[in-house]
Amino acid sequence: MTATGMPVTGVVCRGQRVELGWPEPEEFDRLTALRNRPGVRERFLDSRLLDPVRNREWLATGMRRPFEGVLAIRCEATLAGMIGWSGWDPEARTVELGRVIVDPAAARRLRGCFPANYAGIALDAGTALRDLLFEALDVQCMRTVHLADNALAIRASATGGGIVVSRHDVRRADGARVEVVEMTLTREAWRCLRAQRAAA
């Protein structure tokens, strides 16, 4: 545990049905393979393939915890995906939430474990990490950036309280220009969401 209250080893937090934790060595290559899948990596601004050896090293010792991180999403002892953040600024108290990937094969295997009203693995993990970042890092404003055609991610961010603040073009790592949607969630709005949830 650091002075920020963010654990830098082991399990970090739990959601309704998920557990988020720092990746274990046996999960490194599986997470890299999941990120490198063609249908997944195209959703990142930098869609280049990750080198498994270099990414293994980054997951083990390269992350600047707690300034950035990638966590394993686990459910019923199954690796179900990953989620992370970047750019925590302790002075401005801002952070960017992202790097959300759910393994569709794992999601299908786990489908029968969830109640009928379950919001889904991605939203469960996103809500748990959102709350932790606001609490442990004393975040004042959380930011997400999505490709404009990624309606699922935009809808998930909106469900989690994010509001659209801009749409603009950016240049991808391959030089192509794409439209992105930037969304933010302030600490005040997050507190209102927590109060509403507690009253429900």
Image (cartoon, rainbow, N blue to C red):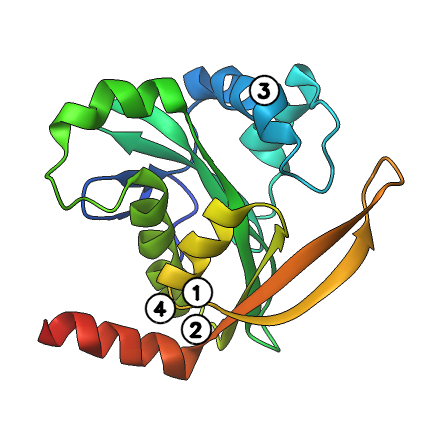
First of labels 3, 4 by sequence position: 3
Q: Which residue is mark 1?
A: 4
The alpha-carbon separation of the residues under discs 2 and 3 comes to 34 Å
First of labels 1, 2 by sequence position: 1
Residue 5 visible in the snapshot: no
Element at badge 1? Answer: loop
Q: In the picture provided, is 12 more to the left or to the right than 62? A: left
Amino acid type of disc 2? Answer: Asp
**Labelled pair 2, 4 in contact (Cβ < 8 Å):** yes
The alpha-carbon separation of the residues under discs 1 and 3 comes to 34 Å
**Labelled pair 1, 2 in contact (Cβ < 8 Å):** yes
Label number found at residue 138:
2
First of labels 2, 3 by sequence position: 3
Residue 28 on image: x %, y %: 50, 21
Would you call the spot at circle 3 few (<14 residues within 10 Å), some (14-19), or many (20 or more)? Answer: few
Amino acid type of disc 3? Answer: Arg
The alpha-carbon separation of the residues under discs 2 and 4 comes to 5 Å
The alpha-carbon separation of the residues under discs 1 and 4 comes to 9 Å
Q: Which residue is mark 3?
A: 37
